[in-house]
Every structure is written in structure tokens, then in C-alpha cells.
Image: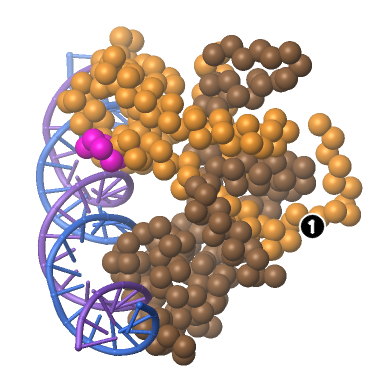
Chain colours: A orange, B brown, C blue, D purple
DNA sequence: CTTGGAATGTCAACAAAGCTGACTTAATAT
DNA sequence: ATATTAAGTCAGCTTTGTTGACATTCCAAG
């Protein structure tokens, strides 16, 4: 990909352009969460449950500590969410084999079913947006998002991608 | 799920690619709000105050109703935020001239100062991300975000842009 | 083997920011 | 005149985050 900002065309860096980017981010995030939110509202769950379910699905057997770092909340906050998911039989918590202090989290069949339902809804919107914008735009989208992450989270973002292949 | 059409490269629409986009969006949004959040944490304000301040700055004299539609919250929720901002002398609420039921909202000098402080922090990160990714990527970023918005909000997103030039 | 520290979990209390529902006031529109 | 709209308020509830204190379990270092 040709990076052709030779110093002349920096129009995309004006305060006005940046402001529009900020607003686009705000409005788009609302769309991003709208579909799963609608599904979750019909049950006793919220966005926090969705996030936990998503990342457990993504990295089956992950530990509570790892999930904590990814989600960026306190253990008390995560624990409340996790407890209801375990009680409801969507998530299973198994004591670690090598380190028995750790709890390894996996989705049950019911959990995986909910994950799929939420994920399908969210992906459908993403797919529509990607299709409308085209592959080149998608590449740029991903580049900017990555550059916007905090370094620590960017590291984790890549770690998930790699552990997944 | 195998989408193989002669010539068309639709690799960017695989479930795995969409999943990565979803996670990128999640992690990036955290970075997006991190800097203003840090500033707000030092005062008695939160993200809701930031949003109100931002859009009042963006459309000075806007009505409560308009703000409500943009932010997508209930009037009770917005009112709580607005009340503290008015009490603290950051926002001014003036009765409408043509329609006296309406309240027109503007930032005071103190409000504008805080807005600038928050905005500068957020724009700095945006600028860094834009610069790192380049103009072409930024164009794609904007395209995908726009395609992701709910139609109603996309309309409002454009309305703000136009009223601003 | 004992002990210190790490990982996990729990209890309690609280705050921010959203929600619904009911209601008032004032002003505009029909 | 009456109905509707804009704004604001009160009360109560939910979700999701926060601290702080404390117990349990287990690994590892002395």
C-alpha cells in the first residue's frame, strides 16, 4: 500500500476533520452495539455479559485474570457478571490443572448458542458496512482503529488474532 | 460460508475478518475515550457531561430536544447532566425568542475552556492515529463508520457537518 | 515446613448514567 | 377552547462500574 502523504495534503488532519472523525466514532459505536443490545434487552443481560461471552468464546479456557485485563474492569465487576452466567449455565468455570488457583472459563452449549445469536447480529451489520465501503476502505478502517488503541490493548488485540489461527 | 466468486476478492467479509473488525472497534473505542476520561475523573464529571458539552459546542444555541435526539438518552437522564453543568456555570440556558417553550443551550467561557481541554486531548489521539494511518486509510475509516451508523443518526451526523461550515 | 505473596472470590457500600412512569408548567398549534 | 409540545421534576429502579476489607487456596522462597 502506497503511503503518499508527502507533506502537502494534510487536510485530513485539520481540527474540523478530526472533529468529524470523533463524531463518526461516537455515532458508529451506537450502531455497532445496537443489534446485540436489542437482543440482550429481552433477557436479563446487558452489554457487560455480551463482552464476557464474546471473549470467552474467542479464547476458550481463558483465565479470569486474562479476561480482566482484556475487558479493563475490576474483578468485582466482572465477577458479578460471570457469576450470573455460571449460575444460568452459560459459562463453565473449571479449576486449573497446572495452577489450581486459576479458573478456566468456557462456554456451555447454551452459552455458545447465545454467543452465536449475538455475534450473528453484530456481524450482519459489520458485513453490510464492509460491503458498502469496499475492501480498500476496510483496510483503512482497520489501520486507523489499530492506531487509536492504547498500546497495551493493541498487544492483546494481536495476541487474540494469533492464538486463533 | 465459502464465498468464492470469480475475480471478486471477498476475503474481507469472512466471519473471522468481521470478528476482528468487531474487536478492533471495541478496543479502539476504549482508546478513543481514554484521554477525556482521565481528565473528567479529576473533576465531578463523567462521559455523559463530555458528550453534552461536545454537542453544545458544536451547535451553539441548540435546543434540549435536539440534543436529546443526538445523544439518544431520555430527557431525565440528560436533564440531570445539564442541570449540574448549568449550576456549575459551564452551560447557559436561554429561553427561546420565537418559541418560548424552547431552551437554547450555549457554553459559557468556562464551559468552552473545558470543552477545549477535553477536545484537545481527544483530537491529539485522533491526529496521531490519522497521521500514522495516512489519508487513504482515513477516508476508508470514515466510510466504514458511516456505513455502520443507524440511518437516523447518519442523517444527524451529516446535518451537524453542514450546519458547521 | 513455614510463611509471604499471588490469584480468586465474596461482602458491603457507593456512584454514574441509563431507564420508566407520573406529573406540572408554559407556550404553541389546531 | 382545547390539544399538543417542550421542558423540567420527582420517585424509584437497573446495569455496570468503583473502593475497601477480608477469606481462601495455592505456589514458591526461605
Residue B55 makes an appearance in the image: yes
Task: Find numbered disc 1 in the image and state the secondary structure of the residue it sits on.
Answer: helix
Image height check: is A99 above or below B151?
A: above
Q: What secondary structure do most residues of the magenta stretch adopt?
A: loop
- The x, y position of residue A71, in whole percent, is 41, 36
Task: Report whether C2 appears left or right of B51.
Answer: left
Identity of the residue drawn at 59% across and 43% down: B147
Task: Report whether C21 appears left or right of B161.
Answer: left
**Of the pair B127 and B13, the residue shown nearer to us:** B13
For disc 1, the marked residue is A11
Location of the C terminus of chain B (image quadrant): bottom right
Identity of the residue drawn at 63% across and 32% down: A131
**Of the pair D15 and B72, the residue shown nearer to us:** B72
- The x, y position of residue A18, in whole percent, is 66, 57
Chain under disc 1: A
Identity of the residue drawn at 20% across and 31% down: A84
Location of the N terminus of chain B (image quadrant): top right
Residue B40 makes an appearance in the image: no
Q: Which residues are magenta?
A: A41-48
- The x, y position of residue A9, in whole percent, is 85, 54
Residue furthest top in the image: A97
Q: Quadrant of residue C22?
A: bottom left
Identity of the residue drawn at 66% across and 37% down: A133
Q: Is residue A45 magenta?
A: yes
Image height check: is A97 above or below A144?
A: above
- The x, y position of residue B136, in whole percent, is 77, 42
Q: Quadrant of residue D25?
A: top left
Amino acid at each position: 500500500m502506497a503511503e503518499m502523504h508527502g507533506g502537502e495534503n494534510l487536510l485530513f488532519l485539520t481540527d474540523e476533520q478530526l472533529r468529524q472523525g470523533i463524531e463518526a466514532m461516537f455515532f458508529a459505536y451506537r450502531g455497532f452495539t445496537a443489534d446485540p443490545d436489542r437482543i440482550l434487552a429481552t433477557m436479563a443481560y446487558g452489554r457487560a455479559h455480551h463482552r464476557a461471552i464474546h471473549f470467552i468464546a474467542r479464547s476458550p479456557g481463558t483465565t479470569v485474570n486474562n479476561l480482566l485485563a482484556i475487558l479493563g474492569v475490576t474483578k468485582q465487576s466482572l465477577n458479578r457478571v460471570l457469576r450470573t452466567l455460571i449460575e444460568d449455565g452459560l459459562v463453565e468455570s473449571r479449576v486449573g490443572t497446572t495452577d489450581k488457583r486459576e479458573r478456566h472459563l468456557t462456554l456451555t452449549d447454551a452459552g455458545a448458542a447465545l454467543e452465536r445469536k449475538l455475534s450473528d447480529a453484530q456481524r450482519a451489520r459489520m458485513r453490510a458496512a464492509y460491503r458498502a465501503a469496499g475492501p480498500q476502505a476496510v483496510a483503512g478502517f482497520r489501520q486507523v482503529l489499530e492506531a487509536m488503541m492504547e498500546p497495551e490493548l493493541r498487544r492483546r488485540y494481536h495476541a487474540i488474532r494469533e492464538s486463533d489461527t
